[in-house]
Image: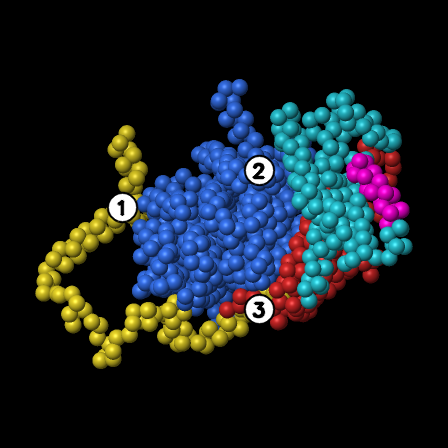
């Protein structure tokens, strides 16, 4: 197995662990943790795409020698992290509200509208 | 110019194998309502209010208060839902209202797509 | 500058202004709200009207001459198409933003009186304007990652809107469900975007469409894109969030717009980004079974069949579940699911009829039936937005006066609310597709073209349309008819601004119904042409 | 959450200025080094979150009103969009970097090559970074503060 494949294996396993947590866990906080796991998997994928072996940071106007890593996926990852923070904050504040109403975080015990 | 505008408006809407013009239909509906009104004029004029004529006949049962007679929204298609109970039990099992199940459906559909598109 | 010069300047910059003006308005709203409620309301409606003015300026220009307009951010020209952010507006985008503009005007107008008694209105209007900005961004952008960002902006804003009434546990839970669903969908879309970027080193949709190869990784990206966007568009069996979200949001009409923006993205991905490989022969199958059977499996064949199967499920389950609901808003939400099924059915039928792709000009060659079907599907998008939107407004009006959405507890409201009853009847005929309302024209196109593909499809579609009529008749019976109820004696008609909002949509519905040919030729046909002829979109960069 | 022990409070008092200064440095050098408005803002906001942890959300809520934070946040957002609009008025396009390389403030022309970067360059980008940083500081701090306050309330109710 090539050593370069390890990040991609990590990406896939992060996404799958995240999906597992979202689908099979019954605690709302754990579901949110699952979502953040998926998100970090996707972010890791983007960062891995930008990496070149022995590359330097893309902050020079002129390349001082060697390969620069791609700046665009890093910008994309940054944006995705910012969005992730907003989503995480929103989800957690909604969970605070839910706990106030139902006094539980177990999804099977929360009665929403489910006809 | 007016004729051009009229022909633009009155142009029928072609659907490939047929056509459809709502304005003609509206004329037809108006004519039908006129006919209905004329037919109504032939009706019997002996009808009197506040007599036995206005009371509903419910197979000899007494008539309830009006509030009790109103069929509630949940009961309107009772027969339909009762006949299709086998389908509705399946549908109800699908709609659990649980967010994990929603994601499970998403993963299942993604898997089917992957099998169909990715493998073929 | 003369007025002509100003108009050209505005037209030139309108793609950016359509998104930027509501965004600026959203951030200014909390500050202006500190002065006075009335001034804030005036400000919000001015912002929305200004945005709509830009929308109509842009879309009338695009739709009349069938051109494409590319707006590059932060530079005079696109010297490096890979890293610049673009807005690309062709006929389809112009068509979609018209829907967005109508929905946002009506939603803002309706919510002035609807939410007058509640606290936190500043935040509400901020969220509404953010959502409008995100929705327009989704409809206009020509960049994949930018699309993801706008998708997330829209879902965050709409989640906060759904959970706006935090005093009710159900609405908070519905908001949480919505954000979980949309975040996971969006993350898988981002995964697909990353896969495409890794292969072609570009994020621009036109550039990707020109260079896509349909390798195995592209297949994976296609699967992720379709399933993520299908979940956002509420296609069965990923529709379950829709009744929860639509049933609890204060103004569900804007959510309809956001859902349709996702549907638009689905069409854009399939027809434009993967457009050059739609007619690819994937497998050649040959076997002997008494006679030799030989046929090709093409990409458009399997995609079309998949979409049609999903569409049939969507129609049937949407209608059957709607028939059973006893809550007005949930019922409309399931009807909305069914209506989305009709659009998908038409689009799937159009995809099946694709015969070949002209690779030089990027034109997708469809049979005449397919073109009609495509037109019907696109026409149904705008009709669905109007009809379902009107229904949600009526539901909001009824909630405003009675504080009740359960069908079992309502009754006899037609005596006190004459105008609302009339608007509801117009919406009823429109949703069920009864002539001469607008729903009929598009459904007729869908029925006839799907009949050519397979008669069973159109039979199911017509049967479910009858059921749609049946369930709205049930709603009419249980809300507006029936004897007077004591608790609803003191009910008055809703305030004028809400009536005006409903009247605007009703007028548009009737105009669309009476003159379908004009609408079809001036709005729908450029959109359908834009979807079929990708050469312009690809050449736009 | 009521406040923590005196040791924690003292250490917070000592480290808070360092963290804030480091965050502001990241914001101001956003156009030169990795980082920018969001990252620096997050650092500053995490420093401020330390106050919430050590002194307790009720005490902090008395000192800093949540409404003021949201006003600050909208000011940051408005200045960001406003700078983009200025690009429309003075430059050619929305988000145009209209006073890069103009010689004035933030207008130095960066010499080509792998030289040390000058902070007085890049046009509107530093200004946008400052606007974003303001928004992120105010926004994240408001989120942490309100959530800590709300959860402490739940505990008291239960």
User: Dot 2: few (<14), some (14–19), or many (≥20) neighbours within 10 Å?
Assistant: few
D23 inside magenta stretch: yes
**Rendered image quadrant of residue C85:** top right
Residue at the (64%, 24%) spot, across then down? D90
- Mark 2 touching mark 3, by CB under 8 A? no
Instruction: Please determine if labels 1 and 2 lie on a single subunit.
Output: no
Residue visible at 55% across and 45% down?
Answer: C125
Question: Looking at the picture, how far across and down is residue C399, in whole percent?
Answer: 44, 57
Q: What residue does disc 2 label?
A: C35
Instruction: Tell me the colour chain D is drawn in.
Output: cyan
Q: Mark 1 points at which residue?
A: B23
Q: Is residue C532 left or right of residue C517?
A: right
* Residue occupied by mark 3: A111
SS at badge 2? loop
Q: Colour of chain B?
A: yellow
Give the chain of mark 2: C
Residue at horizontal 74 percent and vertical 22 percent from the top = D102
Closer to viewer: mark 3 or mark 1 = 3
State the hue of chain C.
blue
Find residue D45 and report its horizontal and vertical position in percent: 77, 46
Task: Residue C56: give x, y in percent of width and height.
Answer: 47, 36
Could you give the CA–CA distance between mark 1 and mark 2, rounded to whole angstroms?
Answer: 51 Å
Magenta-drawn segment: D12-30
Shown colour of chain A: red
Q: What element carries label 1?
A: helix
Q: Mark 1 lies on which chain?
A: B
Closest to the observer, D83 or D97? D83
């Amino acid at each position: 197995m090539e050593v370069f494949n390890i990040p991609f294996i990590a990406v896939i396993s992060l996404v799958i662990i995240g999906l597992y947590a979202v689908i099979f866990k019954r605690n709302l906080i754990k579901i949110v943790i699952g979502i953040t796991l998926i998100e970090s998997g996707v972010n890791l994928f983007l960062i891995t795409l930008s990496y070149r072996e022995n590359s330097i940071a893309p902050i020079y106007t002129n390349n001082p020698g060697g390969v620069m890593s791609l700046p665009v996926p890093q910008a994309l990852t940054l944006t995705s992290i910012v969005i992730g923070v907003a989503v995480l904050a929103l989800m957690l504040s909604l969970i605070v509200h839910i706990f106030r109403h139902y006094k539980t975080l177990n999804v099977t015990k929360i009665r929403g509208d489910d006809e | 110019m007016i004729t051009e505008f009229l022909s633009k408006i009155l142009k029928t809407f072609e659907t490939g194998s047929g056509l459809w013009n709502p304005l003609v239909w509206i004329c037809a509906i108006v004519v039908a309502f006129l006919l209905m009104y004329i037919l109504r004029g032939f009706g019997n004029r002996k009808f009197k209010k506040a007599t036995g004529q206005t009371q509903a006949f419910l197979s000899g049962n007494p008539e309830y208060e009006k509030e009790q007679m109103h069929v509630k929204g949940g009961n309107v298609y009772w027969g339909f839902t009762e006949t299709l109970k086998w389908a509705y039990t399946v549908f109800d099992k699908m709609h659990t209202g649980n967010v994990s199940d929603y994601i499970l459906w998403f993963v299942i559909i993604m898997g089917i797509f992957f099998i169909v598109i990715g493998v073929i | 500058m003369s007025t002509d010069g100003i108009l050209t300047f505005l037209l030139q910059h309108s793609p950016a202004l359509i998104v930027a003006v509501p965004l600026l308005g959203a951030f200014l709203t909390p500050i202006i709200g500190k002065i006075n409620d009335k001034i804030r309301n005036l400000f919000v409606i001015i912002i929305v009207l200004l945005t709509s003015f830009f929308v109509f300026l842009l879309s009338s220009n695009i739709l009349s001459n069938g051109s494409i307009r590319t707006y590059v951010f932060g530079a005079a020209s696109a010297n490096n198409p890979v890293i610049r952010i673009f807005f690309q507006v062709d006929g389809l985008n112009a068509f979609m933003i018209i829907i967005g503009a109508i929905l946002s005007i009506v939603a803002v107008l309706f919510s002035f009186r609807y939410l007058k008694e509640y606290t936190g209105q500043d935040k509400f209007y901020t969220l509404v304007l953010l959502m409008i900005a995100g929705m327009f961004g989704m409809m206009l952008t020509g960049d994949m990652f930018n699309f993801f960002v706008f998708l997330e902006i829209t879902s965050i804003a709409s989640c906060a809107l759904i959970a706006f009434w935090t005093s009710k546990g159900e609405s908070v839970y519905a908001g949480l469900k919505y954000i979980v669903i949309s975040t996971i969908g969006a993350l898988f879309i981002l995964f697909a975007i990353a896969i495409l970027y890794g292969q072609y080193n570009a994020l621009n949709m036109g550039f990707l469409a020109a260079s896509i190869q349909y390798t195995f990784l592209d297949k994976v990206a296609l699967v992720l894109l379709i399933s993520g966007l299908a979940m956002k568009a509420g296609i069965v069996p990923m529709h379950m969030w829709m009744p929860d979200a639509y049933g609890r949001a204060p103004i569900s009409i804007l959510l309809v717009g956001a859902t349709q923006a996702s549907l638009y993205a689905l069409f854009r991905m399939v027809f434009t980004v993967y457009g050059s490989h739609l007619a690819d022969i994937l497998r050649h199958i040959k076997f002997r079974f008494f006679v030799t059977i030989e046929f090709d499996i093409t990409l458009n064949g399997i995609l079309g069949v998949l979409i049609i199967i999903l569409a049939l499920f969507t129609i049937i389950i949407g209608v059957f579940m709607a028939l059973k609901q006893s809550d007005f808003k949930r019922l409309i939400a399931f009807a909305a699911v069914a209506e989305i099924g009709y659009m998908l059915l038409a689009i799937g039928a159009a995809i099946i009829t694709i015969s070949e792709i002209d690779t030089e000009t990027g034109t997708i060659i469809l049979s005449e039936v397919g073109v009609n079907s495509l037109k019907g599907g696109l026409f149904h998008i705008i009709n669905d937005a109007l009809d379902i939107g009107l229904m949600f407004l009526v539901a909001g009006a009824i909630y405003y006066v009675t504080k009740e959405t359960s069908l079992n507890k309502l009754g006899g409201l037609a005596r006190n609310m004459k105008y609302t009853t009339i608007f509801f009847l117009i919406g009823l005929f429109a949703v069920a597709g009864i002539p001469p309302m607008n729903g009929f024209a598009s459904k007729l196109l869908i029925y006839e073209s799907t009949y050519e593909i397979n008669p069973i499809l159109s039979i199911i579609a017509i049967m479910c349309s009858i059921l749609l009529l049946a369930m709205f008749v049930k709603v009419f019976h249980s809300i507006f008819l029936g004897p007077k109820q004591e608790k609803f004696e003191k009910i008055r008609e809703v305030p004028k601004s809400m009536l005006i909002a409903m009247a605007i949509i009703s007028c548009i519905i009737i105009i669309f119904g009476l003159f379908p040919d004009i609408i079809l030729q001036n709005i729908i046909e450029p959109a359908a042409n834009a979807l079929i002829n990708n050469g312009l979109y690809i050449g736009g960069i | 959450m009521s406040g923590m022990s005196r040791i924690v409070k003292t250490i917070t008092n000592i480290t808070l200025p360092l963290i804030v200064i480091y965050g502001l440095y990241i914001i101001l050098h956003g156009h030169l080094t990795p980082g920018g408005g969001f990252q620096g803002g997050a650092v500053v906001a995490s420093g401020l979150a330390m106050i919430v942890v050590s002194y307790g959300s009720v005490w902090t809520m008395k000192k800093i009103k949540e409404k003021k934070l949201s006003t600050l946040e909208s000011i940051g957002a408005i200045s960001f969009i406003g700078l983009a609009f200025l690009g429309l008025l003075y430059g050619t396009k929305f988000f145009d970097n209209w006073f890069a390389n103009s010689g004035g403030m933030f207008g130095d022309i960066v010499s080509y090559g792998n030289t040390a970067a000058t902070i007085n360059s890049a046009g509107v980008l530093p200004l946008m970074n400052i606007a974003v940083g303001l928004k992120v500081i105010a926004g994240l701090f408001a989120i942490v503060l309100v959530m800590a306050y709300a959860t402490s309330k739940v505990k008291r109710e239960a």
